[in-house]
Amino acid sequence: MKNMMMPHYMFKTYDEITPDFLVSLGVKAVLSDVDNTLAPYEQPEPDDKLSAWIKSLSDAGITIAFISNNEQERIELFNRNLGVPAYWKSGKPFKKSLLRAMKDLGTDRTNTVMLGDQLLTDAWAGNAAGLKVIIVPPIKDKLNLFFRFKRWLEKGTIRKFKKKNNITW
């Protein structure tokens, strides 16, 4: 049985994922989590670095859409100046919002990737939808018991991925 939490790629931060890398994979769309993937929870809007990265994707012909389990108010505020397609309360790890986003964007599983920081939601949803999955470590992890437990469950898969791919960070 396939490990639904296993990513295809891991990077230290979202901005290490270059348009050239994505184009080499045939990517036309990135479905991305927001919180702890692109910005910490407490950052209400994108910073200049993130805006520049999104523009670099657009310049390369790659569309980005936000797929978040967070509330509409949070995602609309974050997206206010970007205006990219956004889906809140997406229900990850279920794939329904990812499939809807691909339909809306006119892409499919062969040219779309899922980007996130959590294996139990982002990687699982991406794998369930048949996408390549890119994981980055959380920018600033929550320290409550629920998140600590989730991160503990993910450790073995991350360790296995890093060993298999000779990643030392």
Image (tube, rainbow, N blue to C red):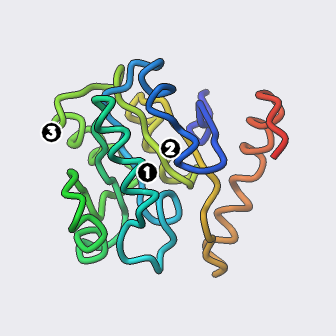
Asked whether the beta carbons under mark 2 and mark 1 sit within 8 Å of each other, the answer is: yes
Earlier sequence position, callout 2 versus callout 3: 3
Q: How far separated are the C-alphas under marks 2 and 1?
A: 5 Å
Residue at image location 39% in from the left, 18% down from the top: 26
Residue that mark 3 sits on: 104
Could you tell whether 131 is left or right of 119 in the image?
left
Could you tell whether 33 is left or right of 108 in the image?
right
Check the image and report above or below for 159 versus 20.
Answer: below
**Quadrant assignment for the N terminus:** top right
Check the image and report above or below for 103 versus 23.
Answer: below
Give the residue type that dot 1 points to.
Pro
Give the residue type that dot 2 points to.
Trp
Q: How far separated are the C-alphas under marks 2 and 3?
A: 21 Å
Check the image and report above or below for 141 versus 17.
Answer: below
Numbered label tally:
3
SS assignment at label 2 = helix
Tag of residue 93: 1
Give the residue type that dot 3 points to.
Asp
The answer to which of 150 and 140 lies nearer the viewer is 140
Residue at image location 38% in from the left, 34% down from the top: 129
The percent coordinates of residue 130 (x first, y second) are 41, 28
The answer to which of 29 and 91 lies nearer the viewer is 29
The percent coordinates of residue 135 (x first, y second) are 58, 45
Circle 1 Cα neighbour tier, 10 Å, few/some/many (<14 / 14–19 / ≥20):
many
Residue that mark 2 sits on: 124
The percent coordinates of residue 9 (x first, y second) are 61, 33
Asked whether the beta carbons under mark 1 and mark 3 sit within 8 Å of each other, the answer is: no
